[in-house]
Amino acid sequence: NLMIQDRYRVFLRATRFWAYLQSEKRSGQALNIKPHLPKAYQQSYAVLCPACPLPGINLDSSWQDDADKR
């Protein structure tokens, strides 16, 4: 009798690791962009919303002063 090893669990693990590597690549974490992100978004795979105002990124630091003048 020839025993055939079950490779399904190994295949599932390789698939999960592949998905992890793809998420690292697509989020930019593999490119070492961590120093350029705000602290709240470091080690996060979430994509920053370009339409949402984020102080220090796409909103001037003096935005409150400008709003008070109007």
Image (cartoon, rainbow, N blue to C red):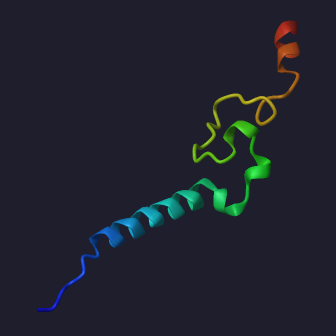
Residue at the limit of the structure toward the bottom, as seen here: 1
Looking at the image, residue 65 lies above or below residue 31: above
Q: Residue at x 24, y 76 (%)?
A: 6
Q: Position of residue 37 (x, y in %)?
A: 74, 45
Q: Residue at x 34, y 71 (%)?
A: 11
Q: Quadrant of residue 30?
A: bottom right
Looking at the image, residue 38 lies above or below residue 66: below
User: Can residue 40 be seen?
Assistant: yes
User: Can residue 70 be seen?
Assistant: no
Locate the C terminus and report the quarter of the image it occupies.
top right
Locate the N terminus and report the quarter of the image it occupies.
bottom left
Q: Residue at x 83, y 15 (%)?
A: 64
Q: Quadrant of residue 26?
A: bottom right
60 left or right, relative to 32: right
Looking at the image, residue 55 lies above or below residue 48: above
Q: Nearer the viewer, residue 58 or 70?
A: 58
